[in-house]
Each structure stands twice: as C-alpha cells, then as structure tokens.
Image: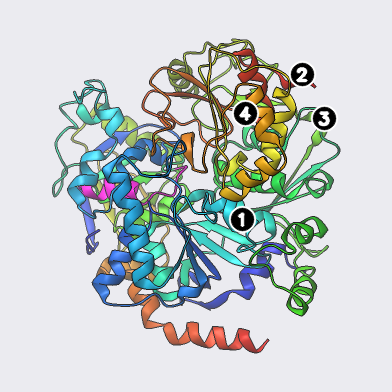
Amino acid sequence: MGKTLFEKIWDAHVVQVVPDGPTQLYIDRLYAHEVTSPQAFDTLRDKGIKVFRPEQVVAMPDHNTPSDQQEVINDPIGRKQVETLAKNCAEFGIKHFAMGTKDNGIIHVVGPEKALSLPGMTIVCGDSHTSTHGAVGALAMGIGTSEVAEVLASQCILQGKPKSMRINIEGELQKGVTAKDIALYIMAQMTTSGATGYVVEYAGSTIRNLSMEGRLTLSNLSIEMGSRAGIIAPDETTFEYLKGREYAPKGADWDKAVAYWKTLKTDDDAVFDKEVTYKAEDIKPRITYGTNPGAGIAIDETVPTLDGLSDAEKVQLTAQLDYMQFKPGQKLEDTPVDYCFLGACTNGRIEDFRAFASIVKGKKKSPNVVAWLVPGSWLVRKQIIDEGIDKILEEAGFELRLPSCSSCLAMNPDKVPAGKLSISTSNRNFVGRQGPGARTVLASPLVVAASAITGVITDPRKFM
Amino acid sequence: MAKQKFNIIKSTCIPVAIDNCNTDLIIPARYLASTTRDPKFFGDAFMHDLRFDADGKPIADFVMNKPEFSEAPREGVHEIIVGGQNWGSGSSREHAAWAIAGYGVRVVISSSFADIHRNNLLNCFVLPVIVTPAFQQELFDTIAKNPQAIVTVDVPNQTVTNETTGHSEKFEINGYKKHCLVNALDDIDYLLSVQDKTIAYEQARAVK
C-alpha cells in the first residue's frame, strides 16, 4: 500500500518509536517568538545545557510588536519579553530577526517568504498557527513551551502519530471567494474539533489552482478545526514561489532539492483514515456570527435559529449570540462595524493587500470605522510600497502600519475596545480575543475592504 | 511546573461545562507577556475573565465563584475539573496548562481535548482523562445534585470512577507516559538520555 504525503515526511523523521510510547520525531526547523520561549530558555539554563542545533532555530518577536511605531514598546512587560528573546538568542547563539529590522515580521509570514520553511521539513513553533508552513509541503505543528525546550535541548519531540485526513476541494472558485472563505466554509462543515487528532492534506483542483499566499491562508486555519497540521503537496506553484528566496537552496542544490520535493505527494493507492470532498461552487464569501471560527455563514445568509437544537446546543448558541449582540435568524449584512483589521498570519501577505486595494481603489474609507492595515512582514510592506498599493490605500483614506501580529490578539496596543464590533481577517473570534469584551467577525480581505468603505458588513461582490 | 508523582486521586470536582473552552478563555492573552514561571501568577489568572469583571470583582454566577466550588484545590478537594467537550482548543499557549496547574488542579476530565493542550497538560503534570460523552454527562449530573460527589482517578489502573453511581471507565495513556507520571519524570530528560540515537539519525540522513 502506498503512503500519504504526511506519512512520507513523518517516516523520514522517525528517530525511534519509544517502547509502548510515542515516536521520537526529528525536527528540522524550530521557530521561536518572544511569548512562548522565555520559560523554555530558562529550562535549559536550569539544566546547564546548550541549544543542541542552534543553526536550525530562527527567532523573532511578533506578538508584542506595536504597529504604529517600533522605536519603543511602551508596555514594560511586553518590552521585557521582547528584550528577553534578544538576550536569549545572543546567549544561545540563535539567529534573531529583531523588531524594526528588514528581516522581522510575523513568523508564519517570514518563514515561507524567506524559504526558511521548505518542502519535506518538519517544522515546529510554540504557536498553534505553525500549521501555516504546511502550505509549502512541510509537516508543521504547533507545540507548547515544554516542547520548545525539548527541541532546543534535543532537536526532537515525542509525539503519537496522528491520523490522516484528505480534504478535496474541486472546481472553480466563484467571484469574490478567497482561500479564507474556503477555510471558513470547511470549518463550518467540520466544526472546530472535526479534525482533532488528524493531519489534514488539502487536495483537488481548487487547491492546485490556489496561489502560494492562498495556500498559506488555508493551511494557517487548519488548527481552527483542531487538526495537528495542514499540508499541501508541493508543485510548480511551490517551486516557483520558493526559487531565489533568501534561504532557498541555490544552483545544483536547488535542482537536487526539487527532484526530492517532486516525490513528496500522496501515492495513488494510499489510504486516508478519513476523506471528504467539497465543491468550490458551493462556497460564497463568508463571515462568522459566533465566538468560534466554525460558527460561520455565507455573507448573504442569516444567523441560525434555535429551531431543532438540543437544550445544550441552545445554551451554547445563545451564549455566543449574547456576547456578539446578534439575534437568532438575524441578517448580518448591513450591520454597522467599528473596527476593520487587515493582517495577521492568516491574511497579512501581499496578495491580501492587493485584494483589499482592488476594492477600495477610488473610494473613501467610512468615517465611522477605525481601520488597521498591518503587513505581516517588512518584506510584505516593501512589496506594498514597491507596487504602489500604499498610494491607493492612502488616497482612500487608509494608513499602512508596521509589521506585527497587531489586532489578532490583544498583546500589543492594537486592542478593540469592549463592546465594539470588529470585522477582521485574523483567525479567531474567541471571546475577548481582540480585547476584553471585543466582538469579532472573521472574514476575507475582500469582505473587510468592502465593509471598511461602507461602514457596515458588506458583500464585496457589490464592488466587483 | 513542578513534577508530581501520580497514583490514585480521590477528590471533589469543579464542573466547567463549557464546550470548546479555548485557551484564550483559560488564560487571556494579556497574561502571556510574562517571563516568570511562578505558579501563583498563572493560577490567579486561571479563567480570569469568567471569574472577574472589568473592575476585578468576582462574577457571582460563574461556577468557580459559587460557594460550593470556590474553595481552592487541596488534597481531596477540587483537584479535578470536569470540562466540556473539545477542552483547550485554539492557541498553543502552555500558559493555559500552567494556569490549571498553578490553580492546584491535577486532573481534567472531558470527552475530548485539543491535541496541543493535551500534550501541554501532560508536560505540566496535569492528567487529561478522556471519557465517553455519556460518562461526562453523568459526572455533570452527579455534581449538580451533590457538589461534594467524589471521583476517583486511578492512574496505575487507568480507571476513572464516579463514586456516587459506581460507574467506572478505563482511560487511555501509553505505557511510557504512565511511567513518567507515576515516577514524576519528564520528556526533556528522556530526550537528553537518548541523544546518541538522535546523532545516529542525523549521521544516517547526511549519508543519504
């Protein structure tokens, strides 16, 4: 029997299977950021040990980084965390992309765009959205801080082997539908725990036709349905994207690498533990109405009613709608919004800014909304400026900010105030995620752009 | 978090019947900007925004603030949380496991856990116990009737028992991890002890 793509990468990294226990899995790349690494470095200091393979570790601050200026972090606690990362990297000999330098940005944007994440690699980071890197054909998993310490100390983690699932999307995407909408659609079908315990491979003609940026968005959101990782087989789109990037193999090494990468696909006779297929034509621009990313609808649908739900389901849905200040059966289109956020590891790439600009070009930002447009990295910001997108945004009344996780999570100054409604390209609409009491509707860059112009939740197809 | 040996835990429980209770709820992001490992810091932040309002006043109708469940865990009391399904979804922050451990909880029982959080709990010497949805519901019902109801988690025998009804279930844990929990050993020391295997792997791969 053949192997799935996931099994090929997994098997190539097995150091040993611990007797009556997990697999000792070798890790090619560890990414570290300021939030989930300080205690891991402390563990190494406690034990008096060095980093085992420092050249395989890359670190950068992103969560605490302000997006308005990067001269100084005013919050003393956040500042200390960022300074601690710099100190730890210096002490342990780890590559560090400091705040405000051209190499910095959100790890899950920077890793692929510098080709630090390559097909066939095992990649981990103390961050659940590490699943993003699976888009290049790597096995990429989020881990906890204890595991960060384990990788620093041994370049390995102990893991039970996940099950395998393939999600096929077939056909052509409709107007106004993006990779973000595919992900929000799949999550609504699967629920936020539907893929727990699985590594999900995305396949099918729709996926093959997605750009690298789109694949990164889709893979990023794999964790929101509980999966251990998302993965997409590398192909010409992948090779084209990676070629010539800063850390990509060069010359003969490149040819050798591509020859290997071409073997990284699921064999025809491989069997998945679970397989589902969706049609691209069924997917419309989407928004969420609740407080988990699976609680979503097409933008022209209404919020679900309580009809036919069990008592427990009624309680859960009512709690979500109470927090969101929405009502069962309510239409959400035309609901006034207070904040618009373009960015995060989900949608902070050049294609997302192009999409946003395509909608707002020649129009004006609604005076009723605060808009945060935050590139995912300094490289993305440079591309935006090089392509003149910043001018289009400026003429429409928007300001381009500095690379940061920004308003995705309330760890830097970009917090949404209590009770305010935000329409956001980020990945989580959890209670309090964008700030205590903040209400979040997740959507694509197109939906956020259209809503930023009108000041209400707006179907972008009206402007296309 | 402190390494603890596991044997038999017999305790009253705190029922947190929230499905998809994500790690942002277990510990809000603003408590993540810390470099400390102080268990009290994280224990105080456990479920913070459900326990306290914006002025820091306890929210009376949240379960952990009700008189019958508000006592801090100690031996035999509130060492077990019975949680809703898909416990610990979302962010990978181990701070959520530190908060649970720091509060004094030793076992979380649910019908399902998010993968990363489950690993984090184990690495913090908090035992995640997966039971059937029916068993989980029976626990909620039993505790609702009697907040003093006792649940026994027997790690060597891998059983969890609702002492009120006498119903018992077997739970899964691999032999390696059970050995770690019973003897208070952690993964990093194990991985350091097998570094020769890692080096052998690297050398074999370099040849290819």
| Residue type for callout 4 | Ala
Q: Which residue is mark 2?
A: A463
**Subunit that carries the residue with mark 4:** A
Q: Is residue A289 magenta?
A: no
Q: Which residue is mark 4?
A: A443
Q: Which mark is residue A133?
A: 1
Q: Residues within 10 Å of mark 4 (few under 14, many from 20)?
A: many
Q: Could you tell me how far apart the alpha carbons at marks 2 and 4 are, in whole angstroms?
A: 16 Å
**Which range of residues does the magenta coloring cover?**
B89-104
| Residue type for callout 2 | Phe
Can residue B79 be seen here? The reply is no
Q: Which mark is residue A150?
A: none
* Badge 3 or badge 2: first in the primary sequence: 3
Between A450 and A164, the one nearer to me in the picture: A450
Check if mark 4 and mark 1 are on a common chain.
yes
| Residue type for callout 1 | His
* Badge 2 or badge 4: first in the primary sequence: 4
Q: Residue at x 57, y 88 (%)?
A: B203
Residue A421 drawn at (x, y percent):
49, 19
| Residue type for callout 3 | Gln
Q: Could you tell me how far apart the alpha carbons at marks 3 and 1 are, in whole angstroms?
A: 26 Å
* Badge 2 or badge 1: first in the primary sequence: 1
Q: Residues within 10 Å of mark 3 (few under 14, many from 20)?
A: few
